[in-house]
Image (cartoon, rainbow, N blue to C red):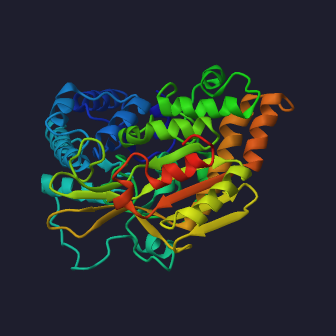
Amino acid sequence: RHLKTKIDAGADFIITQFFYDVDAFLQYVRLCREYDISCPIIPGIMPIQSYGTLMKMTQYCGVNVPRSILDRLETVNRNDDEAVKRVGCEIAADLCSQIYTESNGDIDGVHFYTLNLERSVTEIIQMVKTIDFIKPLPGKCEVSSKAETAISAKRPKEEVRPINWANRPKSYVMRTEDWDEFPNGRWGDSTSPAFGELSDMSHFYSITLGDESERRSMLGQEPKNPQDIYDVFASYVEGKIPLIPWCETPLQPESFLIRTQLVKLNRSGFLTINSQPAVNGKPSDDSVVGWGGAGGYVYQKEYCECFCSAFHTRTLVKNIEENYPSMNVYAVNARGEEIRSGTSVGGVTALTWGVFPNREIVQPTIFDPDVFLVWAEEAFELWSAQWLKLYKEGSESHSLIESIRDSYFLVAVIDNDYVLSSQSEDSPLWTSMLECCGSK
């Protein structure tokens, strides 16, 4: 009845929420027609970009996934994004064909929820053979002109992602609105290829940590001292709590390789929110660090990003400057005070890359010192938006969170010698940090 009222008020057409159950959609259409709703009803189809994205989006939106579709996805490795994406295109094409055939001509169009990933839609349309496409000229950039003008002049047509949003991909999507696709990478969620013009909307995006009682159970009922906060971060690394404000999902499998070091660092006041181990030529289908499909080899530099006190920050910078020539360190606090030190300070550096047959080098993640400063604004804001508000203003817990937010630095450390770092658990990066807290 409400929908009928909207149509009578002047709406011209209806676009549905995305779905994978065609029978349910056709029943919805029949009900609309029974209520004398005669306008076009456009079905919403969201191409499956990765298994993780499918599970998150359908759970969040309450969308049913028929067993038949899940069975088709089980025919490939769910961690192989390219294989899942290929099957996802086939599924979407079949859905379109089924809708067109079984609607008896009542439905003559489809709305694709692209999530700014237009290539899948191109493949789907080709599969259903509705449009003859002209391929772009060789060497022609497929990124939209608006996005191309938004990107930094020093990295035009960039097709990589900064690592800083690795654990907050939804926020990254909200901050980069005009991109088509990024190379299939280890993050799992296919969203956007490069760092574009920022949107102020990002500060309004917060992951759901539950109601106040649930958040307190994860982040602390009434923390009294810094060690209480350190223990929360350590508990996340240990898998005892599922989320923290800076991380939307549990720890990634590759971080299990460095979990012992991460736990020690967090309990000592280095509050890690992003990290990766060094990798030197592992097969691209490796179950822990692989990405991009079979047949290639992947590489990455060791990286750690954390909050820590001004004392720990300066101690770490001094230690790296004096003893670790292959490393960079970048730090900034909530007031915008910066520290940059180490090898080739100021340059953009590749953190993850892969070599595959019949393809150019794939470089999905980078670190950019200037982008790091942008991310830092969001990172510090999360102390307020997600943690500080749990406690009454003026309380001991409120003052504690406020003090950490206002006095700590956000620090990023990169070890450029990925060959040496990949040879031992006691790699230079973790050693340099643990030396600063007496936990070596």
Closest to the observer, 438 or 409: 438
- Horizontally, residue 382 falls left or right of residue 192, namely right
Q: Residue at x 60, y 30 (%)?
A: 232
How far from the left and from the top, in percent, is residue 217?
62, 21
How far from the left and from the top, in percent, is residue 29?
30, 32
Q: Residue at x 69, y 31 (%)?
A: 227
Which residue appears farthest toward the right when viewing the image?
394
- Horizontally, residue 388 falls left or right of residue 105, namely right
How far from the left and from the top, in percent, is residue 188?
34, 46
As drawn, 378 above or below 71:
below
Closest to the observer, 124 or 142: 142
* Quadrant of res 122: bottom left
Closest to the observer, 61 or 204: 204
Please identify the quadrant where the C terminus is shown.
Answer: top right
Number of marks drawn? 0
Residue 48 visible, this angle: yes
- Horizontally, residue 255 falls left or right of residue 208, namely left
As drawn, 119 above or below 401:
below
Q: Residue at x 82, y 35 (%)?
A: 399
Q: Residue at x 73, y 51 (%)?
A: 311
Residue 198 visible, this angle: no
Closest to the observer, 252 or 427: 427
- Horizontally, residue 102 falls left or right of residue 211, namely left
How far from the left and from the top, in percent, is residue 435?
58, 48
